[in-house]
Amino acid sequence: MGEVAATIKIMPVDVDTNLEELKDRLIASLPEGAEYGTHEEEPIAFGLKAIKMIVIVGDLEGGTESVEQAFAAVEGVESVTVTEVGRPV
């Protein structure tokens, strides 16, 4: 089985969400077989920032689905979107 690096954009519920705490909760929620790569904050508008996180997952059908579901269940998350999938560098 190969691995892929998925870039996932996580939108917080509001501008007052502590992104460092949210990032820690997201990493803690990663399902078995998924591995945290890196992250960055992306300014959106009016002080709102998203977290763009790279997660390494198995190259299987539905490979990011369990990560998306885990992230969506984390307190403080408004939405989760996979923006890119490719081979890890």
Image: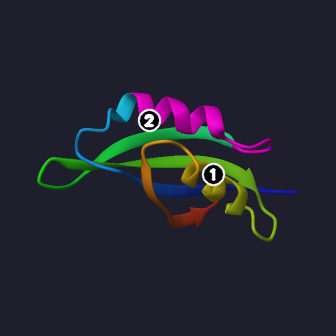
Considering depth in this image, is 5 or 73 the residue closer to the camera? 73
Look at the image and name its color scheme.
Answer: rainbow
Residue 74 sits in quarter: top right
Q: Which residue is mark 1?
A: 88
For the record, the magenta segment spans: 21-34
For discs 1 and 2, the disc positioned in front in the rendered view? 2
Find out whether residue 33 is within the magenta segment.
yes
Tag of residue 5: none
On screen, residue 59 above or below 71: below
Mark positioned earlier in the residue sequence (1 or 2): 2
On screen, residue 74 above or below 21: below
Q: Which residue is mark 2?
A: 22
Answer with left or right where residue 48 lies relative to residue 34: left
Give the percent coordinates (x, y) of residue 64.
68, 60
Q: Residue at x 28, y 48 (%)?
A: 14
On screen, residue 25 above or below 76: above
Which three-letter amino acid code belongs to the residue tagged 1? Pro
Q: CA distance from mark 1 to mark 2?
A: 24 Å
Give the percent coordinates (x, y) of residue 39.
44, 41
Q: Residue at x 32, y 32 (%)?
A: 18
Find out whether residue 30 is within the magenta segment.
yes
Q: Residue at x 79, y 44 (%)?
A: 33
Q: Residues within 10 Å of mark 2 (few under 14, many from 20)?
A: some
Q: Secondary structure at mark 1?
A: loop
Q: Secondary structure at mark 2?
A: helix
Give the percent coordinates (x, y) of residue 13.
35, 50
Residue 20 sits in quarter: top left
- In which quadrant will I find the N terminus? bottom right
